Amino acid sequence: MADNQGGGSNRGTAAMDEEQRREIASKGGQNVPAEERSFSKDHELAKEAGKKGGESVPDEKRSFSQDRELAREAGKKGGENSGGNR
């Protein structure tokens, strides 16, 4: 069983290790066809959600602010995957 670091009950997904939780979480996204996912339809919505998520993390904990090479590589991958169609 996983450690109970949050101080609450150790039931359900809290009792699982991180890998098990990630596997379960990924299944939710896999059940929705790509053409029905809101972010695949609305890039502006995805952009706003990413911005909100980024703003909720302190600067010192943002991986891209800590590692500029990581940020550069992610930007390069994103550009390659978009095909420049934006």
Image: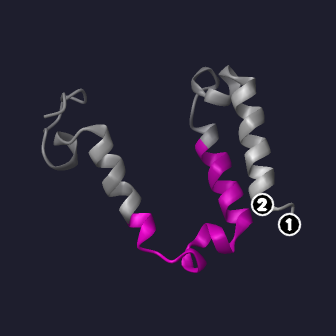
Vertical placement of residue 73 versus 80, above or below:
above
Vertical placement of residue 69 versus 77, above or below:
above
Residue 26 is left or right of residue 76, and the answer is left
List x then y, in percent, for residue 20: 27, 46
List x then y, in percent, for residue 42: 69, 71
Residue 35, magenta (yes or no)? yes
Is label 2 in a helix, a strand or a loop?
helix
Q: Nearer the viewer, residue 20 or 15?
A: 20
Give the quarter of the image for residue 27.
bottom left
Q: Nearer the viewer, residue 79 or 52?
A: 79
Q: Amino acid at mark 2?
A: Ser
Residue 59 is left or right of residue 3, and the answer is right
Q: Nearer the viewer, residue 64 or 8?
A: 64
Q: Residues within 10 Å of mark 2 (few under 14, many from 20)?
A: few
Is label 1 in a helix, a strand or a loop?
loop
Residue 31, magenta (yes or no)? yes
Vertical placement of residue 62 versus 82, above or below:
above
The span picked out in magenta is 28-53
Q: Amino acid at mark 1?
A: Asn
Split into 4 quadrants, where in the image is the N terminus?
top left
Tag 1 near tag 2, CB within 8 Å: yes
Residue 44 is left or right of residue 7, and the answer is right
List x then y, in percent, for residue 62: 61, 28
Residue at 36 percent of width and 56 percent of height = 25
Residue at 62 percent of width and 67 percent of height = 39
| Disc ID at residue 82 | 2
Image label count: 2
The residue that label 1 is drawn on is 85
Residue at 30 percent of width and 47 percent of height = 21
Residue at 67 percent of width and 75 percent of height = 41
